[in-house]
Amino acid sequence: MDWFTIKMMSVNESYVRLLSSQIENELRLLHSVQGGLTVHYDLYDNYAHIRGVVMIQEQETVTLRKEIMEALAGVLAEHIMAEKELQILRQLIIKEFKYEAKEDLEPIEGYCKQFLYGEADSGESSAPNSEEGRLRRKQLLVQPLMQYLDENSELNLEGFLKFRVFDYLEELREIAEYAIDEFMMDRQYQEFISLLQYFVYIQEAKIPAAHLIHKGGHEFVILNDKLEPIDANEFDATFKLEVLEKDINFEDMIVSTLITVSPANIYIHTRDPEMTVIKTIRQIFDDRTTVCSYCRTCHTYLGEVKKQDQLSP
């Protein structure tokens, strides 16, 4: 007797074989069905079936059916998240949010992966806890799967995902919105960086050099070529005020001060060259910047450098 049938549309044999194997492996972990379970798949032109056959005593059917359907719901939920989730997100991004160009889709999908799996490029991602989110999404699939399988022996996987998991789809829709927001902020940030790069390019140098001392955390000191504190008020502050009105995600005052005083060279003394604001300064001023962590100025302001961190004798 077929206890369950999973129907899938337009799938290849490798996909059907994978899902069939996942189901069989999961159900064989149930001690009550060991030796009495077989899982088969049938592949047709436009669809496929996966059938589960269990040979048991009649008096055991009620309890065992519930146990099997709970396990089946769990393995199907895991399969949907692993094999279908990104496809569903791509469809949402294209059809509902109208982002179809490759140059838009790829970064948005990248942000989706950060939110889904915690694959962030840095520790500064605003993504929610990925494991907590994964468990929540799985539960949003398991509950309706169990309810459906309790009442039906045949499940159309595509139809189920389209019409039976609204809470799960809403969760993915929110993730797509988060990703698009991040994408738009990043685009605006890059456009603003380009504006600053252009302004730096056309602006003549006002002082020969500036030393940016990063003491740690968010504590910075800006000195001139004589290692004296720079007073940005002595320079034209028009651009500084315009920059400070922008809602951007780094230390506005440092960047705007450097642009205002326009040094020919910027020496960045830091133990943390990968800090966002330092990377931003290097991006804006390009070949005007030099980063070090072991010179005399570094020693004076930052203290002794650890031997394993030294880049030069």
Image: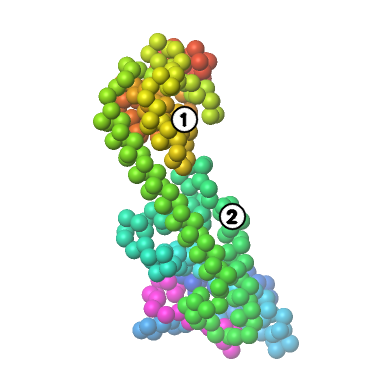
Residue 131 placement (x, y as % from top left): 59, 55
Task: Say if 294 sits above or below 109 in the image.
Answer: above
Q: Secondary structure under badge 2? A: helix
Secondary structure at numbered mark 1: helix
Label 1, residues with CA under 10 Å away: few <14, some 14-19, many ≥20: few
* Residue that label 2 marks: 131
User: What's the residue type where badge 1 is placed?
Assistant: Met
**What's the amino acid at mark 2?**
Glu
Q: Is residue 12 inside the magenta stretch?
A: yes
Q: Residue at x 31, y 30 (%)?
A: 200
Q: CA distance from mark 1 to mark 2?
A: 37 Å
The first of marks 1 and 2 along the sequence is: 2
* Quadrant that contains the C terminus: top left
Q: Over which residues does the magenta segment extend?
A: 1-17
Q: Position of residue 182 (x, y in %)?
A: 45, 51
Q: Give the residue drawn at x 32%, y 59%.
A: 102
Q: Which mark is residue 269?
A: none
Of residue 50 and residue 73, the one placed in the foreground of this image is 73
Asked whether residue 113 appears in the rendered view, the answer is no
- Here the colouring is rainbow
Nearest to the eye among marks 1 and 2: give it: 1
Res 251 visible = yes
Query: For this view, does 84 lie left or right of residue 282?
Result: right
Residue found at x 45% / y 79%: 8
Check the image and name the residue furthest to the right: 59
On the image, numbered disc 1 is attached to which residue? 253
- Name the residue at 44% across, 19% down: 231
Instruction: Say above or below: 21 vs 254.
Output: below
In magenta segment, residue 197: no
